Image (cartoon, rainbow, N blue to C red):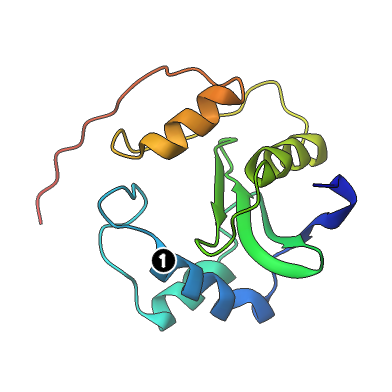
Amino acid sequence: MDIQDLELKNVTKADIRFLYNQLKERDPKINISHKKMPSYSEHTKFVLSKPYSKWYIIYYKNKKVGNVYLSKMNEIGIFILKTIKIKGLGSLVLEQILEKNPKTRYLANVNPKNIKSAKFFEKNGFRLIQHTYELTFD
C-alpha cells in the first residue's frame, strides 16, 4: 500500500449520505456514541453542527472508504467500510490524522467489547487508561 493512494478530505454537506450509510454499518453493541440509529434528519443536523475539531472522509485511490475525526478533546475515531479489506489502511489513516493535527496527547474511546479496535490502538502505541461506567435514567 502506498501513502500517495491515501487522502483525507474535509467532510462537506455532500458527504452526509455516505456518512449515514457508514453509520448504519456500525454494531450498536460495541458503539459508545449512540445506542440507536438516528434518523437521517437527526444525522444531517449532527453533521452540520460541526461536532468535531477535524472530520475527514478517507479516500483510497480516489474512492471513499471511510471517515476519521478528531474531537475537540483530541479523541480519534476511525471508521472504515466493512467491505474494505486493505491491510495497514487504519494505521496509515492514524498516521495522517496525527501528522495533519499535531498535539501532545490523543485519546481513543473504545467500547471494551470492541476487541478489534482496542487491539488496533494498542498496536499503534495507545495505552489503556480507564474504563468508564454510566448510569442513565430514561
Q: x and y percent of residue 95 in the render?
A: 74, 36
Check the image and report above or below for 65 versus 30: below
What residue sits 59% from the left and 42% below the top? 72
What residue sits 26% from the left and 65% below the top? 36
The C terminus appears in which quarter of the rendering?
bottom left
What residue sits 67% from the left and 41% below the top? 88
Check the image and report above or below for 129 versus 42: above
Residue most extreme to the right: 4
Q: x and y percent of residue 15 in the render?
A: 64, 75
The amino acid marked with disc number 1 is Glu
Q: Secondary structure at mark 1?
A: helix
Closest to the observer: 44 or 60? Answer: 60
Check the image and report above or below for 16 versus 105: below
Q: Mark 1 sits on what residue?
A: 25
Q: x and y percent of residue 135 in the render?
A: 14, 39
35 vs 18, left or right, is left
